[in-house]
Amino acid sequence: MQPPSEPRSKARPTGTSSVPASDAQSASAVAKTAISLEYASLRYRGHCPLGMYITPSPDNLLVWDGVFFVHVRYYTDAILKFRLLFPTNYPDRPPKVVFITDVFHPLVSQQNGSFNLAPRFRPWRPKEHHVFDVLHWIKASFKKHALDKLTEEDCFNKEAHRYNDSTSSFAALATQSSMLSQSPSALFDHDHPSLAGRGRHTMTFRDLKPEEVSTLQSRVGLRPWNEDSS
């Protein structure tokens, strides 16, 4: 089953997957300091959601790459790569969120991966809202209680929003997204169509040889897993 294509509409998300280096250079000292402090704050308990891993781009402070391992409901076992793009006047304006991994979700544009923050941050309040709030909203948006509260006007993917009309159909499409996100082409960035034009993600995965797995298991004190063991 293939996810239905996103319907045409007058309003289109305008997110991009990268920030020009010139923008990073023109960012104010306030913005650079605020972004650095936001990243430092992720070490505090509860700031970075469980199942998420974030790292700034080594070449551009205004670009952070993230991976989200989903463990709940429709998208269980999905491995989703996304990107945070900070404006040069942060924190006056919020970061943009772009999913690198293709995912069938009401708030994610199938056209360019843009994720809509508006349902949670309307309006964005610089002194009240922070990056860790954005990360928690991303995680929450994949849970049923948040999906149930979305309005069609807020959804970049209108077809995905209509899952309420057929929960089983939506569940099947979400499960398909999860399975595709684990495929070698998506996980290892090997010529996957959803990655076209979205830039290379700094968090890369690679397929390990059996001997490499054994070495890593030994380093962290894990026993080799035996399928026949009870």
Image: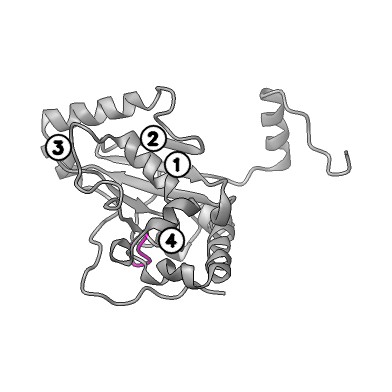
Q: Secondary structure at mark 3?
A: helix
Spatial separation of the CA atoms under disc 3 and disc 2: 19 Å
Give the label, 4 or 2, closer to the camera.
Answer: 4
**Marked residue nearer the N-terminal end (3 or 2):** 3
Residue underneath mark 3: 25
**Marked residue nearer the N-terminal end (1 or 4):** 4
Q: Is residue 25 shown left or right of residue 198?
A: left
- Main SS category, magenta section: loop
**Marked residue nearer the N-terminal end (3 or 4):** 3
Residue underneath mark 4: 105
Give whichever of 159, 55 is nearer the camera.
159
Q: Residues within 10 Å of mark 4 (few under 14, many from 20)?
A: many
Name above or below for residue 33 compared with residue 71: above
Going by the numbered disc 2, the residue's amino acid type is Thr
Spatial separation of the CA atoms under disc 1 and disc 3: 23 Å
Q: Which mark is residue 203?
A: 1
Image coords of residue 228 (percent x, y): 88, 43
Q: Is residue 57 visible?
A: no
Going by the numbered disc 3, the residue's amino acid type is Gln
Q: Is residue 44 visible?
A: yes
Q: Which residues are magenta?
A: 107-112
Residue 36 inside the magenta-drawn segment: no
**Marked residue nearer the N-terminal end (2 or 1):** 2
Q: Which mark is residue 55?
A: 2
Going by the numbered disc 4, the residue's amino acid type is His
